[in-house]
Image (cartoon, helix red, strand yellow):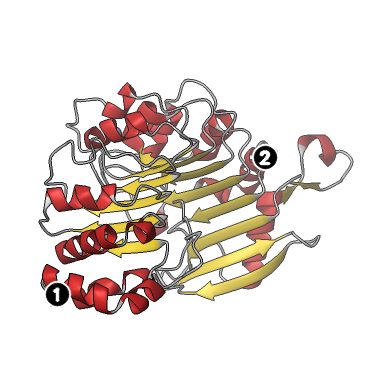
Amino acid sequence: MFHRPSRRTSGNHTGSRYVLESRTLTLINIERALRLRIGEFVAVMTDIQRISSPADVDAFVVYATTYPHLAVRVKELIVNLDQPFSLHAFRHCLSLTPSITDLYLHISTDVPADVLGGIDFKDLEFLKTNLPHQYLLPFLAIHVGPVELSLGPCGRAMEESCPLRLLDTRSYASIECPSECLLGVTHSSLVRLALQESHPGQSYAPPAFRSLPTPLLSLSCLTLDFLPDDYDILENVVRIAPRIQKLKLLEKPRVQRRQTQLRRVWIDGTAWARTLARLSSLEDFALKTAGPIGSSVASEKTILTSWVTSMSRTTRSANAAYQHPTLISLRVWYRCWDAHHEILTLWSRAIGTWRNIYRLVDPPTAALF
Ligand SMILES: [Zn+2]
């Protein structure tokens, strides 16, 4: 999945510190506190704001209406509201931050479909939200600039098509979405795509990806869920996204099968290497699997280097080794043969020859991959 590190300078989001006190104060007290302690509030105000409760919404509205010249500086708004909240206050809150470029919106979906209707962020560059796609239509219809989208579940009935099909999505160069919505959002100019399994055990990403009628020749970065017995997964990447530079394949469990005993496609290292070689712009390849790769650093190196260095048909006669022309980074998260441990390993050819950069045993599940 796409990880978008904050472009703001403050990593700890202290800009929302003002709301902590506010939970025990009435709005009048908040206003009084703001007036009395303006110096302190100004000091903690940054261009990142986090809202995590209805009280935060109210406090921010008071703050932003009192000091609009500071509210207008907010560039990144992070909203996490699982509790019921005032729709009027919420929309007022959004209207007070017209300059935001990055909007993280995770709210209860028990809201009217036009919850974002009329909200206009002229500088918006990134939207990540869990809202059903139907709810996003009026908002996206007026945000046609170069916006990166990271979308949650579609929310439609299975027999319906994704409502995003009604939009012209060509200005969205970067899209993360459920696989069932791919046909609704994809276009020939897409640069980055992350496709998630929609309903575990029911809807899988590879069939949706495979069904694309034409190659995505502009695509340079692809993240794709797959199943352990999707033996043509790499072949389909070659066909649909032949010019990618970064590829991440994330294996998902197939229901009611023992994952570690399944035969993976890369067990034929030579065929796997030849398919990888057809991705002639690929620089960074990452793979997460519940299958085993190697039992030691040495065996791991033997297997992984066979993926990127092999005998090609044309060079075999000259007894020369073939090496992938562009690949310089190989990152793999796999399960040990004993199935009790997991390994996260990174191999790099950045300084000439392939060498291990790090190898973690049982990496924390929260580790970014
Ligand atoms: Zn959808």
Query: Which residue is outermost to the right?
Result: 318
Tell me where residue 330 sits by quadrant: bottom right
Splitting the image into four quadrants, where does ligand 1 fall?
Answer: top left
For disc 1, the neighbor class at 10 Å (few under 14, some 14 to 19, many from 20) is few
Q: Position of residue 319 (x, y in %)?
A: 87, 45
For disc 2, the neighbor class at 10 Å (few under 14, some 14 to 19, many from 20) is some
Residue at image position (38%, 34%) is 143
Sooner in the amino-acid sequence: mark 2 or mark 1 = 1
- Mark in the foreground, 2 or 1: 1
Q: Position of residue 326 (x, y in %)?
A: 73, 46
Vertical placement of residue 324 versus 243, above or below: below
Residue at image position (18%, 36%) is 114
Tell me where residue 83 sits by quadrant: bottom left
**Front residue of 154 and 33:** 33
**Front residue of 176 and 270:** 176
Residue at image position (45%, 74%) is 362
Q: Is residue 282 left or right of residue 365?
A: right
Decide if residue 252 is in sight here.
no
User: Which type of secondary structure does the marked residue at label 1 adopt?
Assistant: helix
Q: Amino acid at mark 2?
A: Arg
Label 2 and label 1: CA atoms lie apart by 69 Å
Residue that mark 1 sits on: 29
**Front residue of 290 and 185:** 185
Q: Is residue 152 left or right of residue 182?
A: left
Residue that mark 2 sits on: 274
**Front residue of 135 and 336:** 135
Q: Position of residue 301 (x, y in %)?
A: 67, 64
Q: Amino acid at mark 1?
A: Asn
Q: Is residue 1 left or right of residue 352?
A: left
User: Which type of secondary structure does the marked residue at label 2 adopt?
Assistant: helix
